[in-house]
Amino acid sequence: MKNNLKIGLLIGLISLFAVSCSEDQIANYSGPDAINLRINQKDSAETSFLAMDPAISEYTFNVEVEIQSLMVEKDREVNFALGNRTTAVVETNFVTPLKITIPAGKTSAILPVTVYKKGLVDVPGGLAVELVVLPSTDFVPGVYGKVKLAFSGDFPKNWYSSKGDVGGLPYIIGKCTKNKYQFVFDYLKTIDMVAYTGWDYGPMTALKDELNTKLDAYAADHNGVYLTDDDGSKMWFSANT
């Protein structure tokens, strides 16, 4: 009886081990091979040349091209097109290969998109490049089958932080406009709002109060006339402006 019990336990353990090995071999993804484009784990990115050394004349976005499929031991080629959100001109404002090879045994590669500073100060709001994955017999575009890259020679179109997300800042000082950013830049001597980002409202609120105090002081020195925002309205920093 004891021997039968031991044999039964041994068979059970062998079966469990076999099932475990089989499960290890099951792929986490099933479906058509898809390509996703990501940059810093997002589907868009932007930069302003004001954030860089004045001597810098170009900047490179490194876009992650990722295959959502099983890894295979052969080179795989991915082709791209420019999307309808592209306002920049190839060779003049930016350069990038429109195809890339993902090496055998790999599931990702980096696609460089180099943008140029020359002429950007004359382009209100900057320019954009949208890259779109082209479907082929091997791939379909994934959930993130396109990525948008924006760049300007002037102030960014959104509050900028060198660490990425600005958190609750727009909810405290309002949306970003060119005139507001110029005022902030003149006050802080930088476009980097990193010291006022995240979700700690204390520093953001203190900055808002300091900026509005400066605006009040300007108006007091100019017969009650305030600086204006981009739309001609009174410049003011608050959640509703």
Image: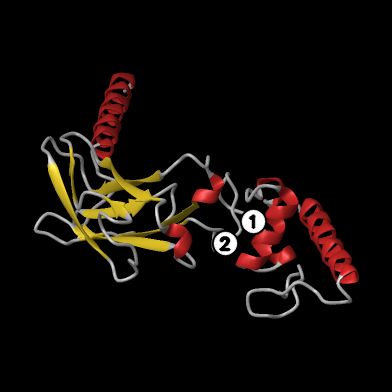
- Residue drawn where x is 34% and y is 69% of the image: 85
Relative vertical location of residue 176 with respect to residue 103 in this rendering, above or below = below
Using the image, tell me which numbered label, if any, was put on residue 196.
none
| CB under 8 Å between discs 2 and 1 | no
Q: Residues within 10 Å of mark 1 (few under 14, many from 20)?
A: some
**Image: 59 above or below 122:** above
Which coloring applies here? secondary structure
Residue 147, x across and y down, in percent: 35, 59
Residue holding disc 1:
167
Q: Estimate the x, y position of residue 46 in percent, counting from the top left.
A: 47, 55
Looking at the rendered structure, the kind of residue marked 1 is Gly
Q: Secondary structure at mark 2?
A: loop
Between 120 and 15, the residue placed more toward the observer is: 120
Left or right of residue 203: residue 96: left
The amino acid type, in three-letter code, at marker 2 is Asn
* Circle on res. 158: 2
| Res 176 seen here | no
Sequence-earlier tag: 2 or 1:
2
Left-right relation of 127 to 191: left
Q: Quadrant of residue 122?
A: bottom left
Density class for disc 2 (Cα within 10 Å; few <14, some 14-19, many ≥20) is some
For the N terminus, which image quadrant? top left
Residue drawn 40% across the image and 45% down it? 59
Residue 112 coordinates in the image, percent (x, y) = 30, 44
